[in-house]
């Protein structure tokens, strides 16, 4: 991880105060939370709407922090403590991350997209891990604070960093790309998340394409080639190396001979004919994510056998198509980390295609951040659910009720249930589910559907 003397850190930043008496103190690692301070950490305080982190600087150093940053616009920096007075602690954090990234003998893979970026990150890391010392974004550390913290936590012997890049508005992905300077970049797809901030899918496409702004001159850009908006906007970019993945044969890589079952998918690819890959994750959309990972693995000279083993041994971040057994023996799929119309349709389509189960049940909640047309999106989801493939639909939340309304146009009334109370929803599911049933949970993270899952599993 990042390790410097205070003098070295001062040389990397524009520091306004004299720290000569502390210059030999070692700082190791970075923290923004006094509850997680480790010995030697550089504490970075932020000014929030309700709390100013500067008031915790002394506490952080008493807990073992080696030093702290301090905003020059905040009065009375403590002269008895090793605080580095800088123009802006956030900009200083980002600058340190950028400089540390270039100190390391490191390759970076940047990943963004409306859906699937965390799953793709896990896949890329698993495949590259067959050959390299790989570190990846943990949790939701994918924004203007989290990504720099991820970089500064990289071991000095790291060979590859796989970095997820999230955003809510224009300019954010560009910043993350400029900080991390990726050697390869992926856009998984374009969906509807953040429509309320970006106005249109065209706007979302433009924002996601900011990932190429920091891409190395000879770097590889891989994107979902079946998305017309990406095809259109990529034409206007001056990029040296572009490859695509997707279902159609126009892509650099596409799947052939797909076989799906309840444990995952087997498929071959256009690049490696006769080689069968097994993916222990459900869904056609995840095969597309795997294709993106294969392109990156090829770029980094991972063998085909390494790729196959990397996919076979894949471990996904929690709540991404995570399967478990309920206490009655029902099979539960937890895909409730986030949701958009695109990802919800994909998840419903997946469940519709699965065989060998008793009853198929959907538990769907609000999709957030969809902008002015959010109600129509939810109605549309309900209307597309096929009663020939799905037996029961349960919804939770104000917008989820619109999914139920749409589903009621095709389903018998007794097979559609809308709830505003999570405990009532959980109680109803407990009564209705039985061994052999398949239950999909899908909603935006803010709906916290995992609380319902806990009732079925504990």
Image (cartoon, rainbow, N blue to C red):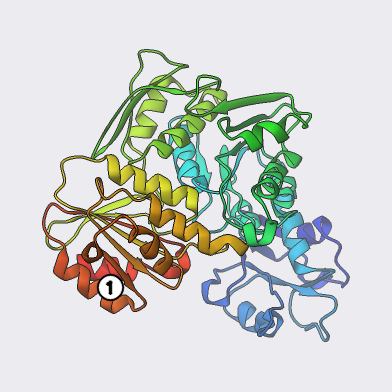
At 33% across and 41% down in the image, what residue appears? 281
Quadrant in which the C terminus appears = bottom left
Image location (x, y in percent) of residue 50: 66, 85
Foreground residue among 351 and 61: 351
Residue indicated by mark 1: 425
Count of numbered marks? 1
Vertical relation: 266 (above or below) 79? above
Q: Residue at x 23, y 62 (%)?
A: 415
Q: What SS does tag 1 mark?
A: helix
Q: Position of residue 435 (x, y in %)?
A: 11, 56
| Left or right placement of residue 117 versus residue 272 in this view | right
Residue nearest the viewer, comparing 413 with 50: 413
Single out the residue that lies furthest toward the top.
Answer: 274
> Which residue is located at x 56 percent, y 41 percent?
189
> How dense is the environment of label 1, judged by Cα within 10 Å: few (below 14), some, or many (20 and up)?
some
In the image, taking residue 337 as reference, residue 230 lies left or right, namely right
Residue 184 visible within the image:
no
Residue 88: x and y in percent read 80, 68
Closer to the camera in the image, 218 or 403: 403
- Whether residue 298 is visible, yes or no, is yes
Residue occupying the point 46% across, 33% down: 288
């Amino acid at each position: 991880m990042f390790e410097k003397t205070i003098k070295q850190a001062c040389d990397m930043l524009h520091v306004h105060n004299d720290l000569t008496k502390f210059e030999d103190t070692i700082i190791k690692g970075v923290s923004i939370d006094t509850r997680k301070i480790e010995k030697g950490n550089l504490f970075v305080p932020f000014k929030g709407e309700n709390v100013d982190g500067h008031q915790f600087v002394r506490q952080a150093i008493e807990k073992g922090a080696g030093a702290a940053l301090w905003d020059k616009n905040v009065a009375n920096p403590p002269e008895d403590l090793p605080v580095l007075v800088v123009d802006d602690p956030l900009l200083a954090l980002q600058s340190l991350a950028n400089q540390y990234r270039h100190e390391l003998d490191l390759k970076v893979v940047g990943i963004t997209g409306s859906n699937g970026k965390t799953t793709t990150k896990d896949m890329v890391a698993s495949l590259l891990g067959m050959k390299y010392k790989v570190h990846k974004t943990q949790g939701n550390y994918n924004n203007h604070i989290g990504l720099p913290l991820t970089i500064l936590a990289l071991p000095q012997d790291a060979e590859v960093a796989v970095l997820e890049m999230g955003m809510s508005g224009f300019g954010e992905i560009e910043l993350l790309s400029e900080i991390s300077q990726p050697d390869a970049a992926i856009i998984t797809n374009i969906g509807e998340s953040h429509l309320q901030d970006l106005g249109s899918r065209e706007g979302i496409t433009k924002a996601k394409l900011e990932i190429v702004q920091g891409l190395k001159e000879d770097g590889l850009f891989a994107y979902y080639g079946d998305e017309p908006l990406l095809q259109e906007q990529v034409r206007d970019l001056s990029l040296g190396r572009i490859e695509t993945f997707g279902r159609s044969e126009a892509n650099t890589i596409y799947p052939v001979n797909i076989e799906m079952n309840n444990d995952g998918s087997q498929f071959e690819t256009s690049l490696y004919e006769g080689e069968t890959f097994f993916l222990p994750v459900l869904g056609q959309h995840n095969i597309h994510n795997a294709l993106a990972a294969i392109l990156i693995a090829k770029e980094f000279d991972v063998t085909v056998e390494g790729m196959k083993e990397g996919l076979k041994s894949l471990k996904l971040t929690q709540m991404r198509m995570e399967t478990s057994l309920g206490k009655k023996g029902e099979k539960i799929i937890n895909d409730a980390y986030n949701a958009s119309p695109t990802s919800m349709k994909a998840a419903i389509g997946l469940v519709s295609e699965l065989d060998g189960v008793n009853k198929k049940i959907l538990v769907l909640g609000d999709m957030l951040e969809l902008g002015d047309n959010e109600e129509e999106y939810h109605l549309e989801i309900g209307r597309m659910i096929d009663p020939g493939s799905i037996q029961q639909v349960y919804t939770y939340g104000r917008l989820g009720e619109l999914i139920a309304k749409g589903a009621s146009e095709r389903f018998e009334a007794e097979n559609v249930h809308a709830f505003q109370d999570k405990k009532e929803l959980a109680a109803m599911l407990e009564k209705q589910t039985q061994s052999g049933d398949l239950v999909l949970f899908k909603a935006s993270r803010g709906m916290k559907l995992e609380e319902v899952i806990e009732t079925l599993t504990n």
